[in-house]
Structures are given as C-alpha cells and as structure tokens.
Image (tube, coloured by chain):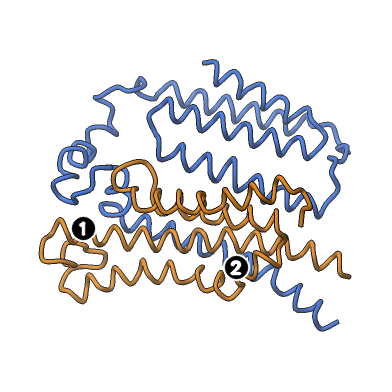
Amino acid sequence: MTRDLVLRVFGKLLIPFVLLFALYVQFHGDFGPGGGFQAGVITAAAVIFYAIIFGLPAARRFAPDWLIESMVGAGVLIYGGVGVFGIVFGGNYLDYFVLAHDTVHGQERGIFWVEAGVAVTVSGVMLQIFYMFAGRQRDREEA
Amino acid sequence: MTLLTMMALVTMAIVAQRNLFAVVVFGSIYSFLMATVLVALDAVDVAMTEASVGAGMSTVLLLAALHLTRGDEVKPLHRPLLPLLVAVVIGAALVYGTVGLPPFSDPQAAIHTHVVPRYLNDSLRETGVPNVVTSVLASYRGYDTLGETTVVFTAGAGVIALLRRRRREGQKR
C-alpha cells in the first residue's frame, strides 16, 4: 500500500471513470472500436490499479478470489450457453437469428451475450494471473 | 516510417539494456508505438487491444514478476553467435516471404475477394451492427471467438494449476 496522498486521492477519483469507460467500450463495441476483450482488460486494469495503490487485501475485499475464479469459467459457460440456446430455439449451435422474433434483433441479442461472456472470462483470467503473482510475493514476505 | 524507425530504436535499446526494469518500460513504449502504427493502418480495434494488453496488462504482470526476481540481466555464458545466425536466417526468410505478398491495400488481393465483400455489404442488414469488426468477430466467426475464449480460459486454469499448489503447501507448513 502506498502512503502517497496524491496517488490515493487521484486513484479514487480515476478508478470509477476507468470502470465507466470499460462499460462504454463493452456496450458501444457494436458502433465503435472495442468489445468484450478490450472491456475485460480495462476492468481488470482498474482493479489492478486499485490493488497497487491500496494494497492487495483491499482489492481482494472488492473482488474476492472465489468471484474471480468463477468468472474464469463463467464467461466460457455464457458463450457456450448462447450456442446451446441456439439449438433449443431450433437452430444450429451458435445460431443467433433464432434468439428473437426478428432475425436482426436475434443477432444483436446473441452478439451482446457473447461479448459479455468474453469480457467476463478475460477480466477474470487477467485478475487471476495478477493475484497469483502478487500473492506469491506476499507469501514470500511472510515466510 | 518515423514510427517504424522509433520501434527499431526501441528494440535496439531493449537488446542493449541490462536493467530489467528499463527493459519492461521499453517494452511498454514499443507496444504503444505498435498501437499507434495500427491506428495509422485504420485497425482501431486491434490498436485498442494492443494498447491495453501489450502496453498495460503485460507491463504490470512483468513488473509483478520482476518483484520476485533480481533486477539485472545475468551476463551470458556463451557468445550469442549461433542465436544471432538463427535470427538472421529466420529474418531473411520472412523478408523473402513478404516479396511474394500482394502490394499494400491492393483491392484485387486474394484476401479481399473471398468473403470480405459479403461481410462489408451485408453485415449491417444481417446483424444490425454497424461495426463490421464486431459482427465478424462475434457472429460470422463466432466459433473462432469461442475458441479464443476457451484459450484464455485454459491460460487462466493453467496459471491456477501451477501457482495455487505452492500456496497450499505453504499453508500446511
């Protein structure tokens, strides 16, 4: 944890906007650059920024280990689940146009959930890797 | 051209530098230059990924790894002549390969005549998504992206499998 007052205040001001930007990148990916992968990385970056300034335990309180670990798998399940929904509604695996009355609407819905799955897995994995590295450091200091 | 020259200079600096912290920072600078090159090539989505993953995330992970090791590169035991030879030969082969490529932004190139016209013309009507990159990534090439997501998942699972066990042993002690 850093004692630098400027960093702490500035970080607290900035992190909400970083998260907001991640949401913008996620949901505006249909219209501009960006999408699930980039949004996932930006979300993870915000939490890592928080961990660097306020220490790893504070970040673990905000995003606990069980949440991160289930995010790693949940994203792939969301993605695969969209494909299974395609079969249930009478199409092939990963067919989106059966997901709504209108084929275009179905496509949009499918893309939305698929991107959500990508974002969840990517941010989960990035945070998991960071936690693992930073956690080892702490274990060594305690030993 | 300026950007590519700067990237070459940064690469030289990385090779010459022995302090690993400086190497990580130079690597981050390299990624930012790469992202700028991609913006210049109008590949904004790729540039965004490069800036966030290459310059941001991998720099942070490398710095975290650097905390666990010593900060200076060890002097090599052997002269790096054989690696140099291998690198030069592979580089020459790659340059030779680029000679056979179609000219830059040639509309008749094979890659632009197969499925690209259909994606560009019909994407908005078929998927309702104005950004063709997103519609190709998530809809037309949904299987590929599912594969990529699985790769990311596998990487995360691998890291958990490798690093988690050590922590549990530490708790037993």
> Residue A107: which disc?
1
The residue that disc 2 covers is A62
Q: Is residue B11 left or right of residue A76?
A: right
Q: Nearer the viewer, residue B169 or A69?
A: A69
Q: Disc 1 residue type?
A: Gln
* Relative to B122, B12 lies left or right: right
Q: Are marks 2 and 1 in contact (CB under 8 Å)?
A: no
Q: Secondary structure at mark 2?
A: helix
Q: Chain of mark 1?
A: A
Q: Residue A91: image x %, image y %?
A: 17, 69
Which dot marks residue B94?
none
The residue sitting at 69% across, 51% down in the picture is A8
The letter of the orange chain is A
Are discs 2 and 1 both within one chain?
Answer: yes
Mark 2–mark 1 Cα distance, whole angstroms, equals 34 Å
Q: Amino acid at mark 2?
A: Phe
Tell me the SS state at disc 1.
helix
Please indicate whether residue A35 sits to the left or right of residue A93 in the image: right
Asked if A54 appears above or below A87 in the picture, the reply is: above
In the rendered image, residue B76, in percent from the top left (x then y), is placed at: 86, 37
- Total count of labels: 2
Disc on the earlier residue, 2 or 1: 2
Left or right of B19? Residue B144 is left
Question: Residue farthest to the bottom?
Answer: B172
Between B122 and A12, the one nearer to me in the picture: A12
Q: Chain of mark 2?
A: A
Residue, x 54% and y 27% (percent of image)? B93
Which chain is blue in the rendering?
B
> Residue A117: image x %, image y %?
40, 63
- Which corner quadrant of the image does residue B68 belong to? bottom right
